[in-house]
Image (cartoon, rainbow, N blue to C red):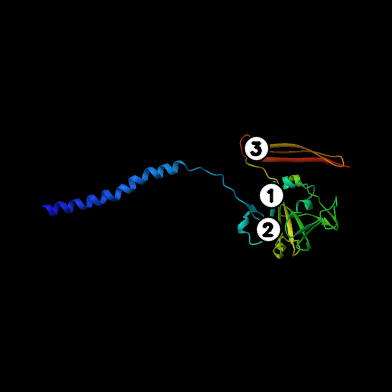
Amino acid sequence: MIDFCAFKLKPVALFCSASLPFIAATPAFAEETAKTEQVEKLVVSAQALKVNTLLQETPKSVSVISQKDLETHAPQKLDEALRYTSGVVSQPFGADNDTDWLRVRGFEAATYLDNSSLFRDGYYTWLLEPYGFEQIEVVKGASAVLFGESTPGGAVNVVQKKPSFKPQNEVFLEVGNNDQRGLGFDVSSATDDKRVRYRLVGLMKKSD
């Protein structure tokens, strides 16, 4: 009888010992779960491949000038915005108010707006207003020829501001030397049914 009882007690003892760690760990797991916080997802992307691709997954040498950098340096023209970008020489002939001069790795760079080539006729080209930029992407090296009209040095792609999920309203005044004055606005929101988002960006400047 003693042997029989000992045999019957062993499985019960083993079950209890295996269960105790699980029971003891349950409150700690619940406490850890309660402290978990949701962090906003941050995705750094670029359109260097003409598609939205993670920057670290782009097999090219790409420099991105963010909107924060643009606000810090406050450039008046596109070539001024690229003064601090490696491999880029901006305004090699000095300041020019009606033309953007850019050279990437020694070659004159083609300029794109949202992946579409800007029309250029000799020394004349469209001048872009930096206040409307979301970011600037500089693709360096021979892989830039995949854009189409480009040189082996690289290409510059300007991304315009797009409607944002978070409503925002901005109005600013600008004053500078040579009697420079400016008034701009940046409004982004959505319709009442949240089905359509929009963004209005405008700027008026005058100087001597």
Which residue is disc 1 drawn over?
66
Amino acid marked by disc 2? Val
Determine whether, in the image, residue 23 is placed left or right of residue 50: left
Looking at this view, name the residue that lies furthest to the right: 208
Residue 180 placed where, x, y %?
84, 40
Q: Which of marks 2 and 3 is nearer the N terminus?
A: 2
- Image coords of residue 85 (percent x, y): 73, 56
Q: Which residue is drawn at 19% across and 50% down?
A: 9
- Of mark 1 and mark 3, the one earlier in the sequence is 1
Residue type at mark 3 is Pro
- Circle 2 is placed at which residue position? 62
Q: Give how far apart the Cα atoms at labels 2 and 3 are.
A: 30 Å
Secondary element type, mark 2: strand
Residue lying at the far left of the rendered structure: 1
Rendered image quadrant of residue 123: bottom right
Residue 184 location, x and y as percent?
A: 77, 39
Whether pointer 2 and pointer 1 mark residues with C-beta atoms closer than 8 Å, the reply is no
Which amino acid is tagged 1? Ser
Helix or strand or loop: what does disc 1 sit on? loop
Specify the quadrant of the image occupied by residue 101.
bottom right
Q: Name the side, left or right, on which 155 lies relative to 191.
A: right
Q: Name the image quarter holding the C terminus.
A: top right
Instruction: Report crowding for label 1: few under 14, some 14 to 19, many 20 or more residues within 10 A (C-alpha).
Output: some
Residue 167 numbered tag: 3
